[in-house]
Image: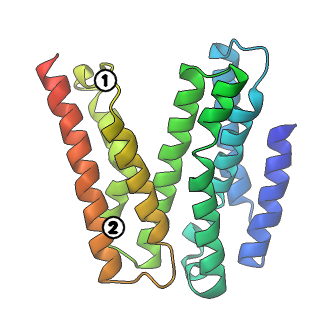
């Protein structure tokens, strides 16, 4: 029922942004929510979903709205461009609330943390694609959103890359910088060459963070 409410809001929000009805964000959210439901059936042991996971599901819905400017890059300019920037900024800001909510409700655990991380990853990938389509940076900016997925793919031929990593504040900080930079790049006033420099700085930091993890895994395999 909650997912249905988010889907209806998505349909309305997409129409406000694009001026026409667009089902793609709803379908994208539906796919993501379906995967979440499947994982819940297999791994969720708490008596209720909780406000924190409901908020994370809401962030997934907001992330799905980024499919609108991805399909209609011209919307990243002018008033709609600022609206898309504000939506992305709100999605990023909400990321800091689900963790404290889960801890306060006593529902914090590995499943919720993984759900939050996967929504962040999807959001970053969509943002990077929108930034590329908007012309703020070249296709290489997709690495800002896709590097984690490349890392996961590399773990199949190299299983030692899938070993657990120790908690590092550096990883969380770089993730915030990564997504924050992508959000800033959506602002209509941020254009080349400034946008290119910002994207390159964020990509350098992300590459350094992944390289540090790969080196740690190499030493401990």
- Which element is circle 2 on? helix
Residue 131 rendering spot, x and y as whole percentages = 45, 70
Rendered image quadrant of residue 169: top left
Residue 49 numbered mark, or none: none
Residue 93 sits in quarter:
bottom right
Distance from disc 1 to disc 2, alpha carbons, whole Å, reads: 30 Å
Q: Does the rendering let one see residue 13?
A: yes
Residue at screen point 82% across, 57% down: 9
Q: Position of residue 216 (x, y in %)?
A: 18, 27
Please report the residue visible at 59 percent of the width from the left and 62 percent of the height from the top.
88
Q: Is residue 98 above or below residue 129?
A: above
In the rendered image, residue 153, in percent from the top left (x then y), is placed at 33, 35
Q: Which labelled disc corresponds to residue 165?
A: 1
Task: Indicate which disc, 1 or 2, sits on the residue closer to the N terminus.
Answer: 2
The residue indicated by pointer 2 is 139
Quarter occupied by residue 105: top right
What kind of element bears circle 1?
A: loop
The quadrant of the image that shows the N terminus is top right
Q: Crowding at label 1, few (<14), some or many (≥20) Cα neighbours within 10 Å?
A: few
**Left or right position of 52 against 92:** right
Please say if 16 is above or below 202. Answer: below
Front position in the image: 100 or 136: 100
Q: Position of residue 67 (x, y in %)?
A: 60, 62
Query: Can the viewer see residue 128?
Result: no
């Amino acid at each position: 029922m909650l997912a249905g409410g988010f889907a209806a809001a998505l349909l309305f929000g997409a129409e406000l942004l694009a001026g026409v009805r667009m089902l793609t964000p709803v379908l994208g959210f539906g796919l993501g929510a379906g995967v979440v439901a499947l994982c819940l059936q297999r791994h969720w042991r708490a008596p209720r979903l909780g406000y924190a996971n409901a908020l994370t599901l809401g962030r997934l819905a907001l992330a799905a709205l980024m499919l609108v400017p991805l399909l209609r890059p011209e919307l990243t300019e002018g008033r709609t461009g600022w609206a898309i920037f504000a939506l992305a900024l709100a999605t990023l800001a909400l990321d800091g609330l689900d963790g404290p909510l889960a801890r306060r409700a006593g529902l914090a655990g590995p499943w919720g943390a993984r759900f939050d991380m996967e929504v962040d990853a999807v959001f970053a990938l969509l943002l990077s694609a929108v930034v590329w389509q908007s012309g703020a940076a070249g296709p290489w900016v997709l690495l800002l959103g896709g590097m984690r997925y490349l890392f996961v793919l590399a773990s199949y031929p190299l299983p030692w890359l899938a070993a657990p990593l120790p908690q590092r504040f550096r990883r969380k900080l770089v993730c915030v910088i990564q997504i924050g930079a992508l959000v800033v790049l959506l602002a209509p006033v941020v254009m080349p060459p400034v946008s290119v420099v910002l994207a390159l700085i964020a990509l350098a930091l992300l590459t350094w963070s992944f390289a540090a993890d790969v080196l740690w895994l190499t030493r401990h395999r």
